[in-house]
Image (cartoon, helix red, strand yellow):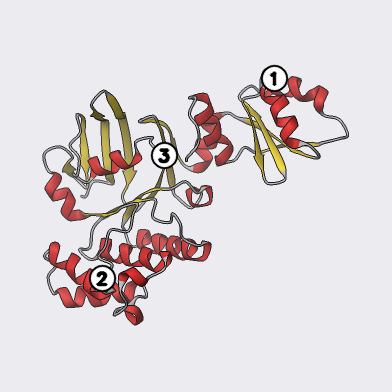
Amino acid sequence: MADPLAIDVRGMTKRFGGRTAVNQMDLQVQRGEVCGFLGPNGSGKTTFLRMLCGLLRPDAGSGTCLGYDVIGQSEAIQREVGYMTQRFSFWEDLTIAENLDFVARMYAVPDRRRAVREGLERLGLSRRRHQLAGQLSGGWKQRLALAACLIHQPQLLLLDEPTAGVDPKARRDFWEEIHQLAGQGLTFLITTHYMDEAERCHRLAYILDGRLLAHGTATEVIRQARLTTWSVRGPRLPQLAERLRALPGVRQAASFGTTLHVSGDDAAALEQTIAPLRTQEHEWRRIESGLEDVFIHLMDRSGTQGPS
C-alpha cells in the first residue's frame, strides 16, 4: 500500500554561512492534498521547496518525499515532482508548443508528441500553440508553466507564488484547475501571499524566520492562535489605531478597508482596555478572527514586518 503521506520530513535545516534559512522544519502533507505554504518574504519557503525537490541538500533533517529518502534519493524525487518557480523561466523566443516539447525532451517523456498535445489541451493552450511565449500575458504564461510542470506526469507539484502579478479571473481559473488535479490524486505545496488563496487550501503551513509556527486547516490555525478581534467603524481610524497600539492588551490594530481590526490574545484584558473607547463616535463589534488577523499577529509577535 502506498504511503498516505506525500511529504513526511522532520528537522529539515539549511544554513547559508552564518544565516539559518530553514530551522528544524517538520512537515507532513497527505497525498491528494492542497497545502498552502505561507509566510513573509525571506521566511525560508523557497529554500524549503528546493530542499524537497533535491535542488538543495539539507544540512540536517530526514524524511521522505513521495516515499523516497530526501537525502539519498533526490534524483528519484526530481523525476516525480513538478516545480514551478516564482519567475517565468521558459524560453520567450520559442512557441508554447516548442517550450513544452523541450521540457518533454528533458524528462525523456515517451511518445513526446502525444504528451505535448495533451498538455496543450489540458490547459486550454491548443489555439495558442504557435504563439511565442514572450508575447503571452501573465495568465497565459502561468498556464504554460503549469502545463510544463505536468508534462512528465508528476505526483507532486511545488508551486512558488504561481499567481503573483496575475489578474483575479486568471487566479480563480488557476485554482479551479488545481482542485481538479488534486481530485485526480495530485498533491500540491503552494506558496502564496493571498489570503483568499490560503482559504482555498485543504491545509496550511505558516513559516517565519525558517520555523514552522502553525499547521492545520484554516479553522484549526485560527483556533490555535486564540486571538480575540474587534471590528471598528467610524471617523479618524488611523489616529485611533495609533492610540490603541500603545495600550495594554492590544496586540495589533490593523486597517481592513473602511474598518479597523483590533486584536489581542487575552479577551478579558482587551475588553477592559477598549471599554473607555467604545463611545458613540465609533461602532465596535466583536468578530471572528480571520487568517489575515492571525498571520499579522504571528509576524508582529516575532517582530517581523510583512511581505515587501
Amino acid bearing label 2: Asp
Identity of the residue drawn at 30% across and 78% down: 129
**Residue on which the image places disc 2:** 93
Residue extending furthest toward the bottom: 127
**Residue on which the image places disc 3:** 41
Identity of the residue drawn at 38% across and 35% down: 43
Look at the image and tell me whether residue 177 can be seen: yes
**Residue on which the image places disc 1:** 247
Asked if labels 2 and 1 touch by Cβ distance under 8 angstroms, the answer is no
Work out whether 177 lies above or below 31: below
Amino acid bearing label 1: Leu
List x then y, in percent, for residue 46. 32, 42
List x then y, in percent, for residue 149. 27, 61
Relative horizontal placement of residue 163, taking residue 267 as reference (left or right): left
Q: Nearer the viewer, mark 1 or mark 2?
A: 2
Asked if labels 2 and 3 touch by Cβ distance under 8 angstroms, the answer is no
Q: Nearer the viewer, mark 3 or mark 1?
A: 3
Q: Secondary structure at mark 3?
A: loop
Relative horizontal placement of residue 236, taking residue 196 as reference (left or right): right
- Distance (Cα) linking label 3 and label 1: 29 Å
Label 2 packing within 10 angstroms: few (<14), some (14-19), many (20+): few
Label 1 packing within 10 angstroms: few (<14), some (14-19), many (20+): few
Amino acid bearing label 3: Asn
Of labels 3 and 1, earlier in sequence is: 3
